[in-house]
Image (cartoon, rainbow, N blue to C red):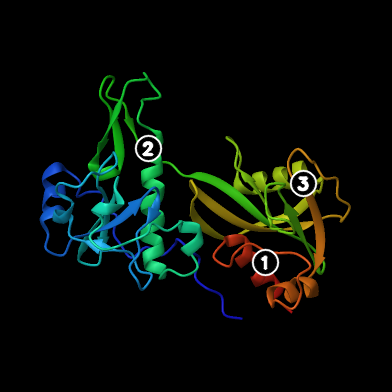
Amino acid sequence: MDFPAIAFSGGPFDHDETGRAPQDLQLRLDDKNAYCILLHQDGPLLDKNGHLQRLSPKQLIGKNLRDPGPLYLGYDGDNPVFAAILQNISDAPHPAQPENLRNVASKMPASDLALAGRATSLFEWHITHRYCPNCGSGTQNMMGGLKRGCISCKAEHFPRVNPVVIMLVTHQDHVLLGRQASWPEGSYSALAGFVSPGETIEEACYREVWEEVGLSISNAAYMTSQPWPFPSQLMIGLSCTANQRELTINHREIESAQWVRKEALRAVIAKVSKDFYLPPRFTIARQLLERWAAID
């Protein structure tokens, strides 16, 4: 089976963290190779071919941009890359309809998706960190978007990602799937949960599985990871082995869970069966499940 690259990863750029002094940023903006991608209401603007709309940063002059204004994402090859959120869709250089990033993630080119995901994560952090957690005063964008500085106490704040473990729990030829009550009827996925302070990712895996379904597990091991900009998270994929199959479902955590045979999972992946529904293929959960199902 051909597995796609992990969605939102593989951004083709250097973050250029040492080239963000005001004079450096001005040079990046004036570079003839510079381009800016556009968002509106947290969704990317795409052209008719499904690619990100790009324009020269100079074309942003006079446009009504959402705070914090243009963010500098870094270099894509020789191209300085910026991102901006338009307040008015009429300011787009070409006719465009903002797209929900989840809805178009499986259709966008991988490099475009990585750019859009990075921009979405950074903008979300800036929009939700306008006030200093140290003193409550306002903060301002600095270093082209790589930090915010408090205008009063001068504290510096940097973008953060929230680590989440997502677990492929297996027992012989079965895999464990769970569902949240808010999901579409019949939808199931791998178990997942946030890493708590003071935990390793393996400890978070053991705890989350125990809390949600009452299983003790062993052999927790890292598999792969995925940036996830809904909001800014890092999904950390692990595999583990259940020591037994009896479930004690914590309904405060999840609605239900079930063991699924490998053949039944393969049938759903191949669209031969509609016994349940899996997450979209661009998600790490789907990737973990497909890779396990492909093993004979």
Q: Which mark is residue 255?
A: 3
Q: Which kind of residue does numbered mark 1 sit on?
A: Leu
**Is 179 left, or right, of 164 in this rendering?**
right
Q: Which residue is mark 1?
A: 289
Residue depicted at 65% across the width and 71% down the height: 290
x then y, percent, for residue 293: 71, 73
Q: Which residue is mark 2?
A: 127
Relative to 156, say whether 278 is above or below. Answer: below
The residues bearing labels 1 and 2 have C-alpha atoms spaced at a distance of 35 Å
Instruction: Please say whether residue 223 is visible from this viewpoint.
Output: no
Mark 3: few/some/many CA within 10 Å (<14, 14-19, 20+): some
Relative to 59, say whether 87 is above or below. Answer: above
What secondary structure is marked by label 2? helix
Residue depicted at 77% across the width and 52% down the height: 217
x then y, percent, for residue 201: 60, 47
Quadrant of the drawing holding the N terminus: bottom right
x then y, percent, for residue 70: 24, 47
Q: Quadrant of residue 240?
A: bottom right
Observer-nearest residue: 10 or 286? 286
What secondary structure is marked by label 3? loop
